[in-house]
Image (spheres, coloured by chain):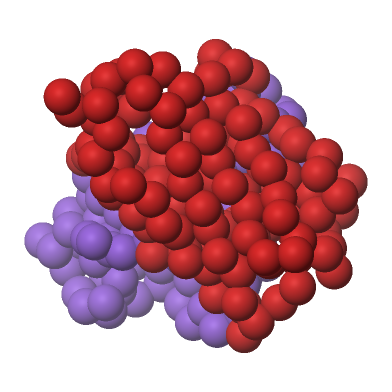
Chain colours: A red, B purple
């Protein structure tokens, strides 16, 4: 069965760049599906950040500024998220998840366990 | 951006009772709606997609209905493990989540 595992620094200073990786096991990313990133600030709801297809085609939340970038490394079977110029508002649990096969990304299943990120000096 | 509004914010229900959760879209999303369950400290779990199709392994007491702008998640007889926060998510036009409904023990 497919499993996803996020990894990241945990603590990032304001104005720095946050880099997160989602390692996928049990399924080859190059075989298909969309792969997405979602975040959840403490005590709040879920926010879709963006998604990537195995070919590298990306979809990003138009409501967010273009500080995010998503990439895929099929050789390592993982995909990554970069967020530049972080602020305290970027403090959240970051999840990665597989999405559906189709014309566009849809629902998320399964999810990784999430990795907490705190932005603080 | 399509705004998803869930109601109520909190629902107090006794075990064994029926729970009805609502999700409204700011514009029509056809049947492009998913429901998730999230327990404290855990990642969300997919329950329903396509507005009414149960995901693999989801118990039959969970059912989804609706289309267009009005959707409902029904839990027919609440079990202890069902007390959690529930989110709806549309995928008709980009992806947006509702604010969630917390189902708590009455």
The structure residue drawn at horizontal position 55% and vertical position 41%, both measured from the top left corner, is A81
At x 75%, y 64%, the residue is A75
Residue found at x 34% / y 54%:
A115
The answer to whether residue A6 shows anywhere in this view is yes
Is B92 placed above or below B38 here? above
B68 sits left or right of B73 in the view: right
Occupied quadrant, residue B105: bottom left
The x and y percentages for residue B85 are 31, 54
Look at the image and tell me in which quarter the N terminus of chain A lies: bottom right
Residue B2, position as x, y percentages in the image: 61, 23
Q: Residue B33, can we see it?
A: no
Q: Residue A104's spot in the image, x, y percent?
A: 81, 43
Identify which residue is drawn at 41% across, 72% down: B76
Placement of the C terminus of chain A among the 4 image quadrants:
top left
Q: Nearer the viewer, residue A101 or B84?
A: A101
Left or right, residue A75 beside residue A37: right
Q: Is residue B3 above or below residue B80?
A: above
- Left or right relative to B27: residue B96: left
Furthest toward the left, the residue is: B106
Q: Is A113 above or below relative to A95?
A: below
Q: How many marks?
A: 0
Q: Quadrant of residue A110?
A: bottom right
Above or below A113: residue A44: above
């Amino acid at each position: 069965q497919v499993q996803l595992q996020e990894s990241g620094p945990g603590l990032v200073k304001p104005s720095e760049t946050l880099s997160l990786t989602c390692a996928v096991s049990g399924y080859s990313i190059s075989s298909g599906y969309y792969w997405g990133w979602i975040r959840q600030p403490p005590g709040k709801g879920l926010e879709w950040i963006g998604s990537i297809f195995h070919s590298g085609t990306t979809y990003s939340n138009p409501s967010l500024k273009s500080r995010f970038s998503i990439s895929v490394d099929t050789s390592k079977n993982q995909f990554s998220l970069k967020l530049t110029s972080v602020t305290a508002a970027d403090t959240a649990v970051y999840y990665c998840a597989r999405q559906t096969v189709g014309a566009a990304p849809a629902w998320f299943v399964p999810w990784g366990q999430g990795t907490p990120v705190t932005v603080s000096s | 951006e399509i705004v998803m509004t869930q109601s109520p914010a909190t629902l107090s229900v006794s075990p064994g009772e029926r729970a009805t959760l609502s999700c409204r879209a700011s514009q029509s999303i056809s049947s492009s709606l998913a429901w998730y369950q999230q327990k404290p400290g855990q990642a969300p779990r997919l329950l329903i997609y396509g507005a009414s199709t149960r995901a693999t392994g989801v118990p039959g007491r969970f059912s989804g209905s609706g289309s267009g702008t009005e959707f409902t998640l029904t839990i027919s007889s609440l079990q202890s493990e069902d007390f959690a926060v529930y989110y709806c998510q549309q995928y008709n036009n980009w992806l947006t989540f509702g604010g969630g409904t917390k189902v708590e023990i009455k």
